[in-house]
Amino acid sequence: GESVGLHLPTLSVQEGDNSIINCAYSNSASDYFIWYKQESGKGPQFIIDIRSNMDKRQGQRVTVLLNKTVKHLSLQIAATQPGDSAVYFCAENRDGGTSYGKLTFGQGTILTVHP
Amino acid sequence: DARVTQTPRDKVTEMGQEVTMRCQPILGHNTVFWYRQTMMQGLELLAYFRNRAPLDDSGMPKDRFSAEMPDATLATLKIQPSEPRDSAVYFCASAVLQGRIAFFGQGTRLTVV
């Protein structure tokens, strides 16, 4: 029978281009967000985080933008390299009690970088 | 190089057998998470512990799954009896007490036939 699974969004870019990966979150009470990168056969790896009192944060080659009005998060990767090819997940956390540190993950976006 | 260590990396077992997955969190991290990743559901939180006490295991099927932390350096996830639908990659992650960044292990790929 036909297999059914998550249909992950995909993004294909050329090496050297900038990449933008988007994420919509649903919980307006979420106050902390993280981007993870997962390479094939490996666990998710932390890239960058942002608190809800910020709208932009920059790291090395990466920038995260947060728009709380529309509950949207984006990850920008500058000068994308073949080693950036992976699945990228956004994750959200809501502060308070036992929820602290408990991350809810998005479905992920597959980024493919062509040399 | 601090990292979360999971064993085994791969496990193939027959339906009905008991499966135990182990996790050594990063030294000093006292929050431990168990996640399951499948093509159908993505990454799902099964359970998590803080200072070895279970805080939330609502994501875990209670009849067959159990998670424990016998000590601060070991977390276990057991499935008994295992079923084919349990086939997935199981990740352990750890974080510091007041931290929100979870650091993941490499996962245990479980196949139940």
Image (cartoon, coloured by chain):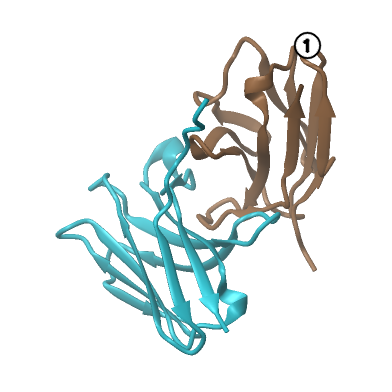
Chain colours: A cyan, B brown
Above or below, B59 against B94 in this view is: above
Q: Of all residues shown, which one is farthest toward the front? A: A1
- Image point 65% across, 48% down: which residue? B93
Q: Is residue A77 above or below residue A107?
A: below
Q: On the image, numbered disc 1 is attached to which residue?
A: B16
The residue under the point 46% across, 63% down is: A35
What residue do we see at 74% from left, 53% from top?
B4
In front: B58, or A107? A107
> Where residue A52 sits in the image (x, y, percent)?
29, 62
Q: Residue at x 16, y 58 (%)?
A: A70
> Which quarter of the picture shows residue A57?
bottom left
Using the image as rendered, state which of residue A66 and residue B110 is in the foreground: B110
Q: Position of residue B45 (x, y in %)?
A: 53, 36
Left or right placement of residue B63 versus residue B41 in this view: right
Tell me the subunit letter for badge 1: B
Q: Amino acid at mark 1?
A: Gly
- The answer to whether B78 appears left or right of A108 in the picture is right
Query: Which quadrant of the figure contains the C terminus of chain A?
Result: bottom right
Mark 1 packing: few (<14 Cα in 10 Å), some, or many (20+)?
some
A112 left or right of A56 in image: right
Q: Along the horizontal axis of the image, is A4 left or right of A52?
A: right
Q: Quadrant of residue B52?
A: top right
- In the image, residue A99 sits, relative to residue A109, either above or below, namely above
Numbered disc 1: secondary structure: loop
Spot occupied by residue A61 in the image (x, y as percentages of width and height): 48, 85
Q: For this rendering, which residue is in front, B49 or A71? A: A71
